[in-house]
Every structure is written in C-alpha cells, then in structure tokens.
Image: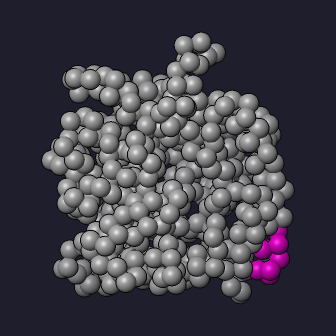
Amino acid sequence: MPFAPKEIAETIRMIEAERLDIRTVTLGISLRDCAHPDLKVAARRIKEKIVRQAGNLLPVTQAIEEEFGLPIINKRVAVTPIAFLLDASPEGDPVLLAQALEEAAVEVGVNFIGGFSALVEKGFTPGDRRLIAAIPEALASTERVCSSVNVASTRAGINMDAVALLGEIIVETARRTADRSGLGCAKLVVFANAPEDNPFMAGAFHGLSEPEAVINVGVSGPGVVLRALQRLGPASLGEVAEAVKRTAFKITRMGELVGREASRRLGVPFGVVDLSLAPTPAVGDSVAEILEAMGLERCGAPGTTAALALLTDAVKKGGAMASSYVGGLSGAFIPVSEDAGMARAVAEGALTLEKLEAMTAVCSVGLDMVVLPGDTPPEAISGLIADEVAIGVINHKTTGVRVIPAPGKKAGDWVDFGGLLGRSPVLAINPARPSEFIRRGGRIPAPLQSLRN
C-alpha cells in the first residue's frame, strides 16, 4: 500500500515534534553451525560468523536513516541461545563465548548483542547449568552482551529450581558490578513464554524456529500517542482507544517500511515489527504520561491497570491492522528507570512494587528496570520472579523480570544509570520472606490452559 501525501506530512510531524523513531533494527543470526567440542574453536567460529553476517548492518541502517529521515536509535544483533552450543563443548569456560560475542559486537558496531541465554522451563542440560553459572562474570566483563533465561511457559509450567538459582545469579551479578550500582543486572532478564523474535534488549535471542538470519524491527512512539490523546481532548474511553489504535497503525507502517528496506539491502528475510511503546527518560516520551493523559492523577492510582489494558490492546489492534507480521512483544513497556513519569510516580508514593506487579498482567512484559534495595536476599528476588512468571503462565502471555538490587542502596534512595537506562528511586520490597517456599524446588505443573492441542 503506497504512502499518501497526508501520511508523509503526519510522519514528518511525528519525527520532528513527537519523538517518533525506530527504536531498534535487530539482525538475528543462527549460530547452530558454530558448535565445536573445543570451546576456543567455537568462540572463533561465533565471532567470524557474526562479523560476516552483520558487517553491513551499520552502514545499511545509517543509509536508510539518511534517505528516509527517520531516526534508527539502536542497531543490534541477536543470536542462538548460547547454552545450546555449550552442550557440544563439555569443557571450557562459557565466558569465552561471551567475550567472542563482545568482540563481534564491537567490530560490527552494534550497541548490544543478545543471546547469552538458556531455555530451561522444563529442566536443565549441562550446557544450561554452565551458562547460567557464568552469567555474573559474563555480564561483568562485557559491555554489550545481554543475557536471558526462560524459566517458565504455559505448556511446561514453572521450573522452580531455575527460579531459585536465578535469584542468586541476580544478586551475584549486582555484586560484581557494584561499582556501577549493579548495572550488570540491567542486561539480564528472566522470562516466562519468551518470544523467539523479540528485537528488544535485554531479552532478544534468535529462536530455534527462526531462519538462518532475519531482520526484526522494534518501533516505539509513546510521545506520538501522548500528543494524539492531548489533541483529542475530552472524549469517551472508546474514542481514546480508537485514537491510540489509529496512531499505532501509522507507527507500525513506518516500522515495516524500514524493516523491509533493511531486509532487501542486507539480503536476509524480514521477520516482524515489534510495536512496543518503549519509553525513554526524556520528558514527553513516557507511558506513564499517556496513562495520566487518560485522566489518572498519577500513574499507580486506582484505575491504572485498566488504563494500561486499554492502551496495550489498542496498540496491538492498530499494529495488526497495519501489518501481517507484528510479533515480538508488541504492547506497552513499563520500565521504571527508563520512564521519567514512572520514576516520578514511585518517588511520590503513587506507584508501588505491588501495583507494578498488577500492571504486568496487561502490559507487554513485566517488572522491568526495577531498582531494589541492595540487601534484598536472593530468595526474595526468586519470589518476585515466581510471582511474575506465574502471571505469564496462567494468562498465556510473555512476562519478564529485570530487577537490580543496587549495592549499598536502600528504599527511597535514587540510582542514576545514565543514558537511556535513566534513573529511579529504589522501591521497597515486602520484608516477609518466601524462603521455605523457594527451597522446595521442583516444577510447578502447567495449568489447564496448556491442554490446547
């Protein structure tokens, strides 16, 4: 469908005044043919293949930016979950592979590379265990490598042994990056129902059902949606939903245009457009401010979950109208430190950890960029993970946990990560502990919703 002159004029306005951008173009690369019994050989193969496949990603996306006048903020790579390769190499330090990913990312010029990952919702292989144990050192010793672990799914249930282990891994990752307020944890997400085509970090990996290589695009635009609601003025909630849906349609169209053009120039298939309203710390680029524009005094007030449900659903409907290939997460992100409105609501006491958890039942992901007191024990973090993935398992949706126990910080302190990661108050966590529950281990069985075949 060609673009009409009115659409072009609207797009120019959205770019110049409303912060419309392509948040990320992510090249997914299969590394399954890089496995080798010698981990050093596997590391060399990994670096060589990424450099070969992604060598043109930066110049191609920069050329598209210049020609279309549309900002592409991040250029990224996602690879096959590295745990799968470790099963072929029974000896050696998995951090070698993380370092190969880092070197490749630096050489091709991407800001993040995702896939130091494992999928353990039903149990562990030796490679899975080795990778998870290596996460703290891998994230502390690299700048661009991101990690994810899928611990639950609607079809498999919840691997509580993995949940318990990840609580300890998060605490250790924070300890090893204590000089940066635990920043390593910002590169680690724990999932339920992780999608294989998500272009957003830290959770991106190249799924086993994906082709040899694929281009996935992540589009954002909280500022565009906010301005649309401000122009709408007094209106019913049905009219609000319609305005969001129409705006999401326009944003998705731009994403597919960029994705298909990058696909053509790179000679790899186009995958999906992920239409997720991903905020930044900039004023006016906030999901919280969208919710407040609907009539909430503050994000976190009673009614916030309903407003977020309306927003997420309308975004998905608009995207589905605009493209047959909407995927990834697609909806609304609610990362606290990356959204100035969310951080303000926490500081004012309107938004608590418990309210955030309720909101995750209807948003794109889950507890995202939440800063916790530095003395939060591993079993408390495991309890948060268990609660969050349970929401995903029961509701057949993706949920994730990206929390940062900031060393030396207590509830109410502020932590500043800089750049797009933003700043946030430290949230208080319930002092009652789930220790015995977490120690029981085992697997929480899949819910009845899993019996769908």
Q: Residue at the spot x=62%, y=50% of the render?
A: 74
Residue 209: x percent and y percent? 63, 51
Question: Does the stretch in magenta take in 131?
Answer: no
One can see residue 14 in this view: yes
Residue 169: x percent and y percent? 47, 80
Q: Residue at the spot x=40%, y=77% of the render?
A: 406
On screen, 448 above or below 48? above
Between 310 and 80, which is closer to the camera in this rendering? 310
On screen, 209 above or below 309? below
Number of numbered discs overlaid on the protein picture: 0
Q: Residue at the spot x=32%, y=46% of the render?
A: 288
- Judged left or right of residue 398, residue 218 is right
One can see residue 450 in this view: no
Q: Residue at the spot x=34%, y=79% of the render?
A: 409
Residue 35: x percent and y percent? 76, 70
On screen, 16 above or below 118? above
The color scheme shown is: one colour
Q: Main SS type for the magenta part?
A: helix
Between 73 and 386, which is closer to the camera in this rendering? 73
Quarter of the N terminus within the rendering? top right
- Judged left or right of residue 63, residue 191 is left
- Judged left or right of residue 19, residue 376 is left
On screen, 418 above or below 300? below
Residue 102: x percent and y percent? 71, 69
Toward which corner of the image does residue 347 lie, by quadrant? bottom left
Toward which corner of the image does residue 29 lie, by quadrant? bottom right
Q: What stretch of residues is rendered in magenta? A: 38-46
Outermost residue to the top: 5
Between 407 and 115, which is closer to the camera in this rendering? 407
